[in-house]
Amino acid sequence: MIDTIHSVNIILPLLYFSTFCIYLYDFIKDESKVHNAKRIFLFITLSLHILYLILRTIEFNHPPITNKFEIFTVLAFCLGFSYFLLELLTDIRGTGSFIIFFSLIFQLISTIFISDLIEVKEVLRNKLLGIHVVSALGGYSGFTIAAVYGMLFFMLYKDIKFNRYGLIFKRLPSLEILEKLNFYSVVIGFILLTISMLIGFIWLPIAFPDISYLDPKLISVSIVWLVFGIGILTKLIAKWYGKKVILFSLIGFVIAILSLLVSSVFAESFHSFY
Amino acid sequence: MNLIGISINHRTSSIEQREAVHLSIEEQQQFISLLKNNLLKEGFVLSTCNRTEIFGIPKNHQVHQNLLFNELVTFKNVENLKFENVESYDSENALRHIAKVASGIDSLIIGDSQILSQCKESFRLSVDEDFSNTTTRKLFDVAVRIGKRAIKETLISQGAVTVSYAAIQVIEKIFANLDKKEALIIGAGETSELAAIHLNSRNIGKITITNRTEEKAGKLAKKVSGLTIKFEDFKKHLHKFDIIISATSSKDFIVSYEEIKSAIHLRKGTPIFIMDIAIPRDIDPKVKNIDNVFYNDIDSLNIIVDQNLQKRKHEIPKVQNIINEEIDGFYSWYNTLGIVPTIKSLRSFFESIELDELNKIKNKVSDEDFMKLEEMTKRLVGRILHNPTKKLRELAENNDELDKTNIHTSVLNFLFDLDDFSSNGKKEIE
């Protein structure tokens, strides 16, 4: 089985690259021939990726969340899968290349650096931790996708405003749809992050009796959660629209990335397992 | 192929000249009957706002394009049109011109999608007026097929090529569900009407018209199932509209920067699309600096129109390829027309021998045996003629083998003495 895992580990970035190329080709050329082919390609890539994650879990007897590069491959999958669901639900197919690009990057880094980790801390084999991490990753995937749609919104907004009718104008869906996709991604990300935080609050004191609620990672995640929460409320209650809401999600995304970097790299935390 | 025709179009004549020779449906019917009596055996007349075309197969060799032209100017009593304002076509050139017209690549706006239905209409009229026969009907089929293939297989009709359609294209990049949007049309002239009709065709949620003359606003509102609002009041309601289109003849701005700014504030940032197609402009162009206001005037929308026209121009070679394919097909069919009499005569010749021989033995065999013999001889003749008929058709369908086809047909005619043998078997077999 280990040979299969190694082979799939090499095949996966190649598949993501091929899928990215097909989506990009379709974005540039808009040929009906590849409209369905690209979705089939993404489906095959994601199917192989889920098989790879299952095989790793069985072979190494722990979910693939025990180091950064295992996390990266799960993140690549979450991004691709979230986009796949969005494409199926909305039938908007023009934005795939912008999101699959992130999956490709995360998977490529993972493929290069991932190692066969059999011996891990006992705490990392806990099922609740698995759900906690996967839902957190799902949440961050949602925020990443929202940020991509936010960027696309701004690009199209500028193009229309300044009468530039190029590729972005021709291929992207309307501003209203991009705004909706951004908002749905934020909401899904927010719900998943909330689930992750709730599990964390239940499980962490059991696993770590000396837990500090002033832990940098907990504080940074709470700030991210708060920013996105306020963003959602402004849309739902204050009926904000367009640029302002999108800006909230972009700021939220930047804070999320910065806080993750700062709390993971520079600050001491009980929350570091590797 | 003995096809001739004339074309008075946007390249050859002014709009006044084209208007002068334009034929209404009733006039086309009368004119066709004149052509039938005097000049053409079969053909068609196409008359649109941009072109009048007369094509057909002449009654005799004395009929030329100048006679078609004279017939038209006499019929329409036109004085300001000369033969120099006409394009003349014959044989393959005529066929290619008809194909170009039907495919839209000869139109003033390349890829004009209306021309195909106008061609179909004039072909139908020719059939209804008994002005068509085998060749012209085949010609109609080919022209319509070229038009359809051009639309289906190329991008010749893609993209907005009018300012109003270009505006719709931009609107659709801002809003997702037009059926939930409200539009305000300021002015009720021709341009406003066109814009209102385009919006209505896209199932816009609600159209409201405002105009200084309320009666005109009412008329337009009725046309597009819309509402009206008093001209003095419309500014109070600007924030309610997602789309504002203005096309009045006012010399000054009728909507200011501050008014749009206040409207967008009331809308909490929900975008407004503004299309100012008036000259001079009706809305202060500074509004384009306001967030979530998408302001377009004629110049900015013309950018889209020009882009799409360029794209259509790039599709012309693809359409030309379709025309070439279909014209080759047409000639393959047309060439076989020449061998049909020979094939018919050959078949009749063999069938008359068969009949003659059967008659000789009719009284010498039983009825049952005679039927068997009859069946057998029919099969025999069929099998003997199968290969020569097939080979001759194949030869005729190949446009490069015309000389060879003629030689083979002559040999058959000579060998079986078919020249004197009509296809109904009139000549007696010795």
Image (tube, helix red, strand yellow):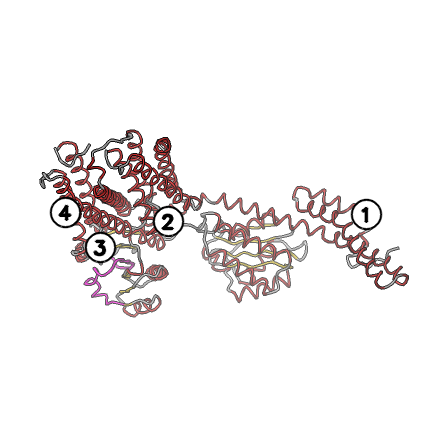
Quadrant where the image shows the C terminus of chain A: top left
Task: Please state the chain letter of the residue tagged with numbered disc 1 in the rendered image.
Answer: B
Question: Of all residues shown, which one is farthest toward the right?
Answer: B364
Q: Within 10 Å of the Cα at label 4, are there few (<14), some (14-19), or many (20+) other Cα atoms?
A: some
- Please determine if labels 2 and 4 lie on a single subunit: no
* Front residue of B112 and B359: B359
Local SS, label 2: helix
Q: Within 10 Å of the Cα at label 3, are there few (<14), some (14-19), or many (20+) other Cα atoms?
A: many
Residue position for label 1 = B414
Do the numbered discs 3 and 1 sit on residues whose CB atoms are within 8 Å?
Answer: no
Can you tell which of label 2 and label 3 is closer to the viewer? 3
Report the magenta residues as a range.
B228-252
Name the residue at 27% across, 61% down.
Answer: B184
Above or below, B388 relative to B182: above
Residue position for label 4 = A226
Residue position for label 3 = B270
Please tell me which of labels 2 and 1 falls first in the chain. Answer: 2
Type of amino acid under label 4: Leu
Type of amino acid under label 2: Val
